[in-house]
Amino acid sequence: MRVGARNRITGRVTDIKKGKLMCLVKIEVPARSRLASVMTLESLDELALKKGDSIEVIVKAVNVLLIKR
């Protein structure tokens, strides 16, 4: 699949919390950082994601905000 997003990060699924319509997929990425994605249960089923899966995170957003630490 070709996409226009340039921000790609590899990671591993660490947890999936399912609700009635949506789910929260938690992902561990290099440098011991964590990301999360909210998606429909239908999307979760289509991707066949499960804990421990190796995945690629593709980020395409209108705004990405940074805060100096």
Image: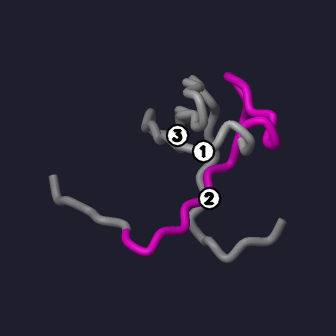
For label 2, the SS is: strand
Q: 46 or 65: which is nearer to us?
A: 46
Residue at image coords 81%, 34%: 48
Inspect the image, locate mark 2, and give the three-letter code of the amino acid beneath it. Answer: Ile
Q: Which mark is residue 39?
A: 1
Q: Quadrant of the N terminus?
A: bottom right
The magenta stretch is 44-63
* Closer mark to the observer between disc 2 and disc 3: 2
Q: Which residue is mark 2?
A: 58
Q: Is 38 situated above or below 13? A: below
Q: Which residue is mark 3?
A: 30
Inspect the image, locate mark 3, and give the three-letter code of the amino acid beneath it. Answer: Pro
Residue at image coords 55%, 27%: 19
Residue 63 position within the rendered picture, expressed as x and y whole percent measured from the top left: 37, 71
Q: 15 or 44: which is nearer to us?
A: 44
Figure disc tally? 3
Residue 26 position within the rendered picture, expressed as x and y whole percent measured from the top left: 53, 32
For label 3, the SS is: loop
For label 1, the SS is: strand
Magenta includes 46?
yes
What's the distance in space between the residues labelled 1 and 2, CA to CA? Answer: 14 Å
Residue 36 position within the rendered picture, expressed as x and y whole percent measured from the top left: 49, 40
Inspect the image, locate mark 1, and give the three-letter code of the amino acid beneath it. Answer: Met
